[in-house]
Amino acid sequence: MKIKPSLVPKLLFVGLSCAPIFTTKAQQSGTIKRVYVSTKGNDQNPGTVARPFATAEAALRAVEKSKQGKATTGIEIIFTGGTYYLDKPIQLSAALSGTKKLPLRIKAADGKQVILSGAKLLDLKWEQGGKGIWKAKVPTGMSFQSLYANDAHLIRARYPNYDASVLPFQGYAADALSPERIATWKNPTGGIVHVLHSGRWGGFHYRITGKDGASKVTLEGGEQNNRPSPMHETYRYVENIVEELDTEQEWYLDEGTATLYYMPSKGKDPNQLKFVAPQLENLITIAGSANNPVHDIEVSGIRFTHTAPTFMKTAEPLLRSDWTIYRQGAVKIEGAENCSLHANDFIELGGNAIFVNNYNRGVKISGNRIEEIGAGAINFVGDPEAVRSPAFRYEKFVPLDQMDTLKGPKSNNYPMDCEASDNLIHSIGLIEKQVAGVQVSMAESLRILHNTIYNVPRAGINLGDETWGGHEIAYNDVFSTVLETSDHGAFNSWGRDRFWHPDRNKMDQLTAAHPSLILLDAAKTTKIHDNRFRCDHGWDIDLDDGSSNYEIYNNLCLSGGLKLREGFFRKVYNNVMLNNGFIHMSGSK
């Protein structure tokens, strides 16, 4: 059948766009104060281009001093080329704020690659042992969960062995915790079990605390999903067990003896390699408060790398969504106004790349490249104390006679009027599986525009709840999604807000009697338009469990179609769906 052009949505797909470079009048008139940092600098220097500082901390002290009594000079902190191994995160407080016309800029020198690393450079003297395994001493008391040699990510000793072609987990085995296998481990304390949820709704992670007899282990953890379940019987693997060090590029750290073991490629001498071990979870924190926000700070042109994995700390439930979260990232922004991250690289990180936490207004995350990430890419998450009558599990419901029935939030402690645009995001969730390219929970009026998101274990874009709506999700290209999990979409939302009850009949009775409850949390309409979505293992657009107050139009759905579970106030029109269709589900899970 020939489709009339007038019936085809006008779709605009833009990846990373080239933003124009503007200069302020202050820049043009030469009133910018520039402070320089160099890997060859000295903190006793004045911070000039000829005599730079060695650390960001010294540069920030100089900026704070220069700002005292002065408000008309723009300031730039410029890192010259090289790798900066941070021993603590860079803290940007309200006292360092710029102005709208003269923001504080933290940037790379023109044409230079600047790397901020959370790793420690190791000074190792390797000795060759048996079976191709070398060993070296590390500082007593040192601990790390990931290791790099000449910038290549090494594999912590695991079973089954790493295979990049296998999903999930790059290798899994049903017998990873079999009695027969456990019996071969002399002392597995400190080992890690990674496993999918039995319904494949994300994953769990457990630490082995010891052995119970000869063929059982004791575990702690498993808090990484807000829909608890048994472990999946097949999709699991174990790591950090010395007996599993049996293939090239694997390593194991014996913390008790401060000994590092490593099996290099055949014929390679590890003494010729540079080893680094991630130590920090966070590289830059931009932190103020609603009453005293940090404002008008721009960070650009920097590569953030080698942060420590944080999967065992992912435990805070996000209302009644399936998620738990750890409020941390390579860059964390809290209590900020009109701050931006632009044209940075976030690569080889153990946890989240960017976390926009609680009160934030006018924060813009744009033009960044985010890849090879252990957890999620961009997270906008508010404070549950701002939510009226919050519940924190799928099956929980606040009875009407106990419910706060005022509309909207209780406080302003959440992200609003922020933006994630023109970002290239792929290959995330390498460790944690309940993650997204852009994750939103307890936020209002966000703009998620022109992003390219692919190769993710779960959703490309996820709304964990409808509090408080008003988002625009447009011109995004989201594909190769839900690669390691199930029952999800390239775009996913949950709408388990105050009105929603897991028993559909009870929800229908409540909303029929009190229809005003539906929009207490989803106060503003969320618009999803002019996107291209593809999910071959779920739905292209998945509005789950009561998702309400949406307008969905001009989208191209390439594989999984569009799903509407129970919900209200949804307009869906002028979308093109290939290889699937429109799915309406009225039952409860």
Image (cartoon, rainbow, N blue to C red):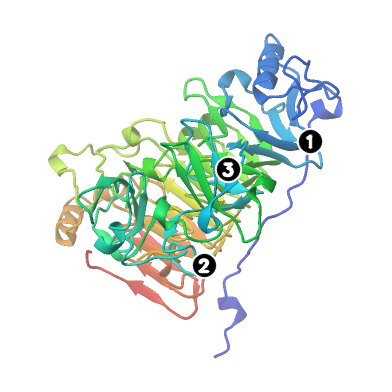
Q: In this view, does 280 lie above or below 20?
A: above
Single out the mark in the foreground, 2 or 3.
Answer: 3
The foreground one among 132 and 400 is 132
Cα–Cα gap, marks 2 and 1: 36 Å
Task: Please give the name of the residue rendered at 15% of the width and 44% of the height, measured from the top-left corner.
Answer: 399
Res 570 seen here: yes
Task: Determine whether, in the image, residue 467 is placed left or right of residue 307.
Answer: left
- Residue 477 falls left or right of residue 344: left
Q: What residue type is labelled 2?
A: Ser
Q: Which mark is residue 109?
A: 1
Q: Which of marks 3 and 1 is nearer the N terminus?
A: 1
Residue 35 position within the rendered picture, expressed as x and y whole percent measured from the top left: 76, 23
SS for callout 1:
loop
Marking on residue 480: 2
Quadrant assignment for the C terminus: bottom left
Tell me the quarter of the image containing the N terminus: bottom right
Within 10 Å of disc 2 (Cα), the crowding (few <14, some 14-19, many 20+) is: many
SS type, badge 3: loop
Task: Look at the picture and state if 14 lies above or below 226.
Answer: below
Identify residue for label 3.
Answer: 306
Q: Is residue 483 left or right of residue 196?
A: right
Q: Position of residue 219 (x, y in %)?
A: 27, 47
Q: Which of marks 2 and 1 is nearer the N terminus?
A: 1
Q: Hey, which residue is sitting farthest front in the picture?
A: 130
Q: Distance between the residues labelled 3 and 1?
A: 21 Å
The residue positioned 51% from the left and 47% from the top of the image is 261
Q: Where is residue 351 in the image (x, y as percent from the top left)?
A: 48, 44
Residue 564: quarter of image: bottom left
Vertical order, 89 against 540 (above or below): above
